[in-house]
Image (spheres, helix red, strand yellow):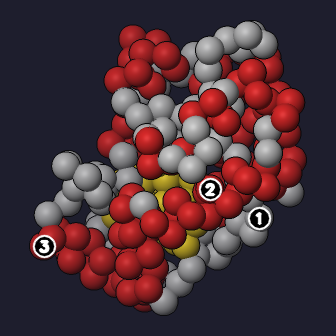
Amino acid sequence: MAIDQINREVFNIWEKHCNPCDDILVPLMYYPPLKTDGLLFIGINPSFTSESYADVGKEFFHWSNRTNFDLEKDAAIEKNNRRDLLYFRKFKEIAEYVNLNWESIDLLFWRETKLENIKKRFFVSQKPDKPNAFAADQLLLSDKLIRFATPRLVVVVNAFAAHIMINRLSLHFDDKLGCHIGNIGSRSVPIFLVSMLSGQRALDVYSYQRLKWHIKQVLNHI
């Protein structure tokens, strides 16, 4: 599946569930090349902080601007964010430690900083196993992205996202590897369910060190 097809589908989802004049933001876009056969880091949704739009202004991302949305400019912003933002720094470090490339996706495409707002908007009774129709359509699309990435190993970096993944991939814990295993397409893939790697609730330095070591050990044994 081509990335531009993913982007068309997510715009179709927004047009299906949102009104043209809604005071909302355009969804997260993905840009080629989507790195495959490496580490895949999965979050719950793209954050939207002042750092994300400092150079263009928040109005650049407004849904009312969708017909004139500058994909090239957005791609440049995303590239800079992946280079500069603290959120992605640990992904790079882990990938370098195990000598693999890395990719990052989110289960939902809705730009929002507060997790509580995500739970209220997209999940019935805020339960991860009860997505509403808008969320369900996004999750089906993120399933396609995950399969397209053909990861060797997945790291889920949000607790709420981890609960969603457990239900969607029927994860089971492997006592020998010490991590979960899930089916992605026809392959069984190691999946690490961890807390945030950056920010106030991030793993402490020693837990992070053990995580890197553990990921490397699993990769050496699969």
Disc 2: which residue = 77
- Please name the amino acid that badge 1 sits on: Pro
Q: Distance between the residues labelled 1 and 3?
A: 35 Å
Give the residue displayed 58% in from the left and 38% down from the top: 57
Instruction: Give the mark toward the camera: 1 or 3.
Output: 1
Does residue 73 appear to the left or right of 204 in the view shown? right
- Please name the amino acid that badge 3 sits on: Tyr
Disc 3: which residue = 206
* Callout 3 crowding tier (Cα within 10 Å): few <14, some 14–19, many ≥20: few
* Residue 38 in picture, x, y percent from top left: 58, 76
- Please name the amino acid that badge 2 sits on: Ile
Place residue 65 in its image quadrant. top right
Does residue 19 appear to the left or right of 24 in the view shown? right
Q: How far apart are marks 2 and 1 (CA)?
A: 14 Å
Q: Is the residue under label 3 in contact with that under label 1 (CB below 8 Å)? A: no
Q: Find numbered disc 2 in the image and state the secondary structure of the residue it sits on.
A: helix
Q: Is the residue under label 1 in contact with that under label 2 (CB below 8 Å)? A: no
- Residue 172 lies, with reference to residue 160, above or below; the image says below
* Residue 60 in picture, x, y percent from top left: 67, 36
Q: Nearer the viewer, residue 154 or 5?
A: 5
Q: Find numbered disc 3 in the image and state the secondary structure of the residue it sits on.
A: helix
Residue 188 shows up from this direction? no
Any mark on residue 32, and which? 1
Q: Which of 68 and 40 is in front in this view?
A: 68
Instruction: Give the mark toward the camera: 2 or 1.
Output: 2
Any mark on residue 202, and which? none
Q: Nearer the viewer, residue 209 or 190?
A: 209
Q: Which label's residue is closer to the chain start, 2 or 1? A: 1
Rendered-image quadrant of the N terminus = bottom right
